[in-house]
Amino acid sequence: MLHRWRVITYKEICTVFTMGCDIMLEAMLLVLLMISLTICSTEGFQQQWPVPYKRFDFRPQTDPYCQARYTFCPSGFENGSIPKMKDEDLIDVYRLQAPVWEFKYGDLLGHFKIMHDAVGFRSSITGKNYTAEWYELFQLGNCTFPHLRPNVEEPFWCNQGAACFYEGIDDEHWKSNGTLVPVARMSGAMFNQMSKWLKEDNDTGIYYETWTVQEPTRAKPRVWFESYDCSKFVLRTYQKIWELGATFNKEIQTNYTRIFLYSGEPVYLGNVSSIFGPHGNTSLAEDIRMFYTPFRPPHSFKEFLISILAIYDEVVLHKTFYLFYNFEYWYLPMEYPYIKLTYEEIPLPSKKHV
């Protein structure tokens, strides 16, 4: 599924982009991260924090409006199926990590510890390798920011994410600038149980969430919203196979990239129908559209710089962020340091960390 690696040129960065996750939109997200280097009341309502990630009964069809620059899971098994292993097989589990967008930027983002995570498997009976990873159907920019369509008030989101399971492990990709190390071993019977869980997890967890939102750094900050991304998929998978009885090498250190927004207690604004449309909140709807306007893919480098200044003004100076989570909108009263990217250790599963 991996594309040939190459380093993007300056000329390509400054081109006009089509639908999908554009390079300029990705660059805008990176610059936003580098800033760190009418409201509905919830009074009288006991809000659960972090807000539980909403799961669904089935995965809906994607809207034709959403188009990916790179095909999702091109070499994956048909209908998301996973080969069945013999119960007596011994399956080695591998930690896979490499810089995000490596096929475009080389190892550039690895220097900033902006990493993509996956899980590898190897059958001792057949000798075949497999890779499982969870990522955006329409690339990161579309999962993080909406499209603002002409003559349509409501922002439009292409924010589905899904698991991809395919045969093979691209050793060069994971080893050259990242990690490919064995972390656990399990039986073929455990693998088959994990496969059933993975399908259910994939069918019910349908959308990607970039941000972890919490109070400013302190001893025990409250987390308002958890991310739902590639690293969380890996952590869920590790936890599941540990529960099934897999043996982990707890001496291996495992770090993950996390992107934080820091805010005071969020304020619930409403869902799409309560904010937008003829019976919605006109002023709030306009505020949300105006907030997301600078995140649109610019058509020139000048527009790009103007957009970055507008984002800085809104997020840092006016301390405002509108978060779309569970298909609902929340107001975040931003606090210093506003936005931060970390590379934190989260240990492998064990009784001590459950």
Image (cartoon, rainbow, N blue to C red):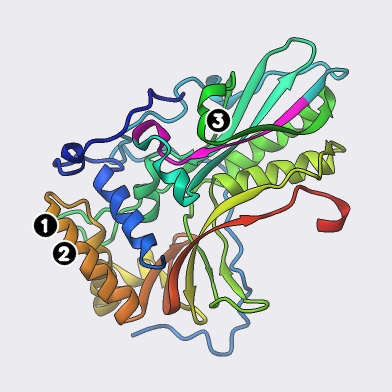
Counting from the top left corner in percent of width and height, residue 42 is at 52, 84
Query: What is the total number of numbered labels drawn onto the structure image?
Result: 3
Q: Is residue 272 left or right of residue 265?
A: left
**Residue 278 at least partly seen:** no
User: Which amino acid lies under the numbered mark 3 shown in the image of this protein?
Assistant: Trp
Badge 1 marks a residue whose secondary structure is helix
**Rendered view: 87 above or below 28:** above
Residue range of the region highlighted in magenta in the rendering: 92-104
The residue indicated by pointer 3 is 174
Which class describes the residues within 10 Å of circle 2: few (<14), some (14-19), or many (20+)?
Answer: few
> Which quarter of the picture shows residue 15?
top left
Query: Which x, y percent locates residue 220?
Result: 67, 77
Q: Earlier in the sequence, mark 3 or mark 2?
A: 3
Q: Which residue is mark 1?
A: 302
Residue 306 badge = 2
Q: Quadrant of residue 61?
A: top left
Q: Is residue 69 within the magenta segment? A: no
Residue visible at 21% across and 68% down in the picture: 309
Amino acid at dot 2? Ile
